[in-house]
Image (cartoon, helix red, strand yellow):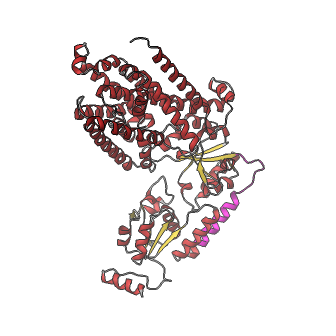
Amino acid sequence: MVTALLRVACLAGGLSLVGAAAEARPERVVSVNLCTDQLALMLAAPRQVISVSYLAQDPLLSVMRERALDIPVNHASAEEVFLLRPDLVLAGATTPPEALRLLRRLGVPVEVFPPETSFQDIRDNLLRMGRALDREARAEAVLAQFDADLAALQDHPADPPSAVLYAANGYVAGDESLAGAMLAAAGYRNLASDFGIRHGGNLPLEELALAQPDLVVVSERNPGHARAEEMLDHPALRHLLERQSREVISDRDWACGTPHVLRAVADLRALRTGEKLPK
Amino acid sequence: MSRNPNYSLLLTGLGALCLALFAASVLIGPAAIRPGDSLRALSGQGPEMLQLVMRQIRLPRALLALMVGAALGMSGAVMQGFLRNPLAEPGLVGTSASAALGAVLAIQLGLAASFPLALPLAALAGALGSVVLVLLLAGPRGGTMALILAGLAISALAGAATALVLNLSPNPYAASEIIFWMLGSLSDRSMLHVWIAAPFIICGAALLFPTGRGLDALTLGEDAAAASGIDLRQLRLMLVAGTAAMIGGATAVAGTIGFVGLVVPHVLRHAVGARPSRLIAASALGGGAMVLAADIAVRLIAPERDLKLGVLTSIVGAPFFLHLILKTRRLEW
């Protein structure tokens, strides 16, 4: 009854909503979150995604930038998204819930993807995205490749070196985060657990300096200036970084839970074993 | 200036307090380090990383707390003496907020990255503008109302402009830094920040110390001061330049820390016999002690939260401010 009323209301407004058959492949998919942008672009058929978030075109954040450049961008506002007449909206857990509630009230199907905090979450979200886009075969293929790549990378050194991901404001990633899983997969021991940090938290610079980790992965600088990132230039941190053979930056490969995290894992592993990475 | 034993005793006491708090500030931190090891590392002995922590993280923090506090206390004492109004204070009259705007502009426009002195210079320019504006709007004869309202307007405008600049920054962290510029913090500062702020604060102090004699004469009124050979224009010039340099240097590295310049002179006024010249030195030491204590407190209360300094100074200072308003209201109306 409600659905019927809504459909009448939309028709009266001159909007022809596709989606009478719920099982049909969505043809006008709008993604409003950087991470769903990238997963969707990896799996979608050509022209199935009609808009991605503006961040998908950011070279610092997006691994799917080249694909995203041809697609109109949105800024996750309900009005802008609704006017695109989507038959599916892909959102992340951090998307403003007001916008999503409004879209749902207007009868737009919304699929919210939880953030990935482990490799298993990446697998789950890949398959879920495949189902949402009706591209399950493609999702299975990407997943099989991901599992094969991960298996090839993983080894467990007897005496793993210590590592820590240190980001703006002194934020470190714990074991129960995706970055933590990446460090572990590359054969490192996450220093965060020594300080009782499980998911993520702030670690004062002096504690980091005194712990002397073998590897500090620093976060990528954003354009413009922020005091939060100023501490990444602190002489004490620079001193730690100078002891490493090279700097490792948590770049766009780290930003979202996509199969591209394995590129970062391979890079970390190469640093540990001293082997050269094939370009 | 006669050698008053009580006054010397007060300065000695405040100096000792600063010294004790300075030592505590260096010895207290998130990493538990034994005091003996800390002091050895500070003097350049012991493990390299420990030396780095003591000399590059804890020492600059304590030095900055002392310098910034001294700048705020001294500026407050001089402003109150010159305007002959106990409510004048760099935070309340908008000097700190304007200095913060100057600093934020220098940082976001990239000037600070191209040459380091641009940061305190821009903050100084902001502070200078607001001091001149307040003197024009409220004037040496202006009442409390005019002073506070002018300060409120300048603070609001500078605060809004600061927020605007930070919101327009392409950096996702910039907008959350509005809170730093509003409430101030000394966490994760390095020696670089000490070298940036120190010359400005020292120059400011050199300009403000000699104003004491003039301010003493001014307590008797402008005519009496002029009759005793005080050049009021020169006095005003030194005051404007000195406060701007001090607040500019302090705010550029620590953000705005409110109420220190209000509370410290107020607490010490009776102890120095209400003589502005004596209040200047006493307030410098008192301000240093207050900011050192506040900075130790934020680390003890919430060690990993980077609690802002202004939170504590305002909790202490705002009730003082209300108390002073009530007091001056009784006198004025």
Instruction: Please say if B74 is above or below B328.
Output: above
Q: Position of residue B160 (x, y in %)?
A: 33, 46
Residue A279 in view (yes/no) = no
Does the segment drawn in magenta span residue A151? yes
| Image quadrant where one finds the N terminus of chain B | top left
Q: Position of residue B252 (x, y in %)?
A: 41, 34
Name, please, the residue furthest toward the top: B2
Q: Is residue A5 left or right of residue B16?
A: left
Q: Is residue A267 left or right of residue B197?
A: right
Determine the image quadrant of residue A138: bottom right
Give the residue displayed 63% in from the left and 53% down from the top. Answer: A174
- Callout count: 0
Point out the stretch of residues depicted in magenta. A139-161
Instruction: Please say if B216 is above or below A171.
Output: above
Mainly helix, strand or loop, the magenta region?
A: helix
Instruction: Please say if A72 is above or below A200.
Output: below
Residue B268 or B177: which is nearer the viewer?
A: B268
| Image quadrant where one finds the C terminus of chain B | top left
Q: Position of residue B10 (x, y in %)?
A: 48, 20
Residue B115 or A229: which is nearer the viewer?
A: A229
Determine the image quadrant of residue A126: bottom right
